[in-house]
Amino acid sequence: KPSIHYYNETAGLTENRYLNYINGEWKPSSTGAFIENINPATGEVLGEVTQSTAADVEEAVQAARAAQKSWRLVPAPERAEILYEVGRLLKERKEHLAQVLTSEMGKVIAEARGEVQEAIDMAYYMAGEGRRMFGDTTQAEMPNKFAMSIRVPVGVAGLITPWNFPIAIASWKSLPALVTGNAVIWKPANETPFMAYEFVRIYEEAGLPKGLINLVYGSGGEVGEAMVGHPDIDIISFTGSNEVGAVINEKAGRMLKRTSLEMGGKNAITVLEDADIDLAVDGILWSAYGTSGQRCTACSRIIVHKSVKEQLEEKLVERIAKLRIGNGLDESVDVGPVINRSALERIDEYVRIGVHEGARLLCGGRILGETDGISGGHYYAPTLFTDVTADMRIAQEEIFGPVTALIPVKSLEEAIEVNNSVKFGLSSSIFTRDVNRVFQAMRDFDTGIVYVNAGTTGAEIHLPFGGTKGTGNGHRDSGVASLDVYTEWRSVYVDYSGKLQRAQIDNN
Ligand code: UN1
């Protein structure tokens, strides 16, 4: 059993009870209700988490509003000093954070370390932004007049984040929001409350003034709805399902509130006849079964040239059989559990749908249990379908589990068509040695991220992360593009001519 030490001495919490953080204070929700946090690898109860209410959101908004009034006036390089300290603390606690992450979310420990590293990178990158945050200067139309555009904070940012990347995605949103001068109200997923607690503790220890980050936990929609519907929350940044994203956008749209939405994917790896097949196999295994397929960038389709289809199938089946499945805290495990029982059932339901549609199951396709040496927890066998057609539901809908579908094609042109035939547009990849085809794919794959000779996962934080079509609404997380989510452009004209010069009018 892992020994997990929580940094709770000074916060004065009972060991496994997690509370709201509002205006710099840890406190239970206004109802005092708690829910259990469960380890998906074992089914063990890790602790309990307060269930927040609309009244808690109200309190958080008041605190955020008040704190943002002075925060916006703090020079950005000074705000950034706190982010450097956040980066340092994340780095110092990397191993501890990775252990907590694996315990409550289930991804294998190597990936958990990688995720914490993403947050560290983001902290330092955004801290550097405190000394950039460039605006533009340009020429004015008239003499003795100066023109520029500068970034100003939006105000109060409401962040709603998922369980699959509990600290990386929270870092992609909270760090740019804070460095640009906003205050934050954060609702993490109910499945990963400890990571939220750990991250907020780090902000607190780094010296972030009270009220600038507020943490509320919620399920059943009350908290999320209160955030989206609150007139004093200026922007909602959400990563999660398309269903929830659509509800948020509809409600926010009626209020003319800004939203940044990052949702599903149905990412494909294309393997052409001239590809390095062994390299493609590595890329597919990592992207399809890493994090048990629970990444929005996961490879859930393989588009393969028919001349190398059988070779690819054989190699994949052989390698899938060698994947070690179990508790991600065990360093030798390749694939951990899925998040909970309902996810397991949903994944299995999709597999049934695939079989019913006439796809051929090459391996996996079942819930693992006692006979596989697995007890407790929620495990699904890494699953590979072949002879899938682009229009099947298993080739169109996001499964969010360790299931991928091989679709044979006859040409690059057909591969591009199949790649683009889904409603999502997050990530895609091509394995080929032909530079001409590389550039063609780069131009024609209709996704926000394109990989060449690598899987569909593994985005780096200093590049924009996001997708086209149903994946998002045009905004990007991380990278310099994330500044656009949390700032308004303000255009400023300074006329130093001493007389009234009228734009677009003949002044003579
Ligand atoms: C996600 O699944 O929502 O590119 C984020 C990747 C990771 C982030 C995934 N760096 O796969």
Image: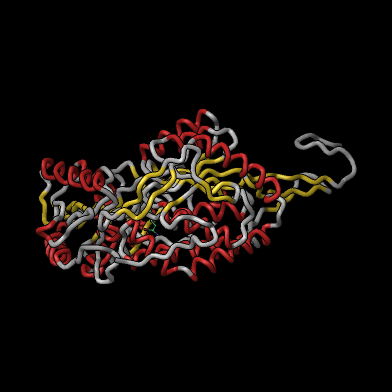
In this picture, is 138 found above or below 10?
A: above
Residue in the foreground of this view, choosing between 465 and 402: 402
Q: Is residue 246 above or below residue 315?
A: above
Residue in front for this viewpoint, 379 or 193:
193
Is residue 409 at least partly visible in the picture?
no
Identify which residue, 130 or 463, lies in the foreground. 130
Of the 4 image quadrants, the one containing the C terminus is top right
Viewed as shown, does residue 461 lie left or right of 280?
Answer: right
The quadrant where residue 329 appears? bottom left
Q: Where is residue 46 shown, x and y percent of the image?
A: 34, 55
The residue under the point 74% across, 48% down is 147
Residue 176 occupies quadrant: bottom right
- Depth check, front residue: 308 or 76: 76
Identity of the residue drawn at 46% across and 34% down = 225
Rendering coords of residue 217 (x, y %): 45, 44
Q: Position of residue 11 (x, y in %)?
A: 53, 57
Q: Which residue does the image show at 76% across and 45% down from the upper left?
A: 493
Q: How many tags in the picture?
A: 0
Image quadrant in which the N terminus is located: bottom left
Compared to residue 344, the image places residue 318 above or below, namely: below
Residue 309 visible within the image = yes
Q: Residue furthest top?
A: 254
Horizontal side of 391 relative to 459 (left or right) equals left
Q: Residue at x 56, y 60 (%)?
A: 126
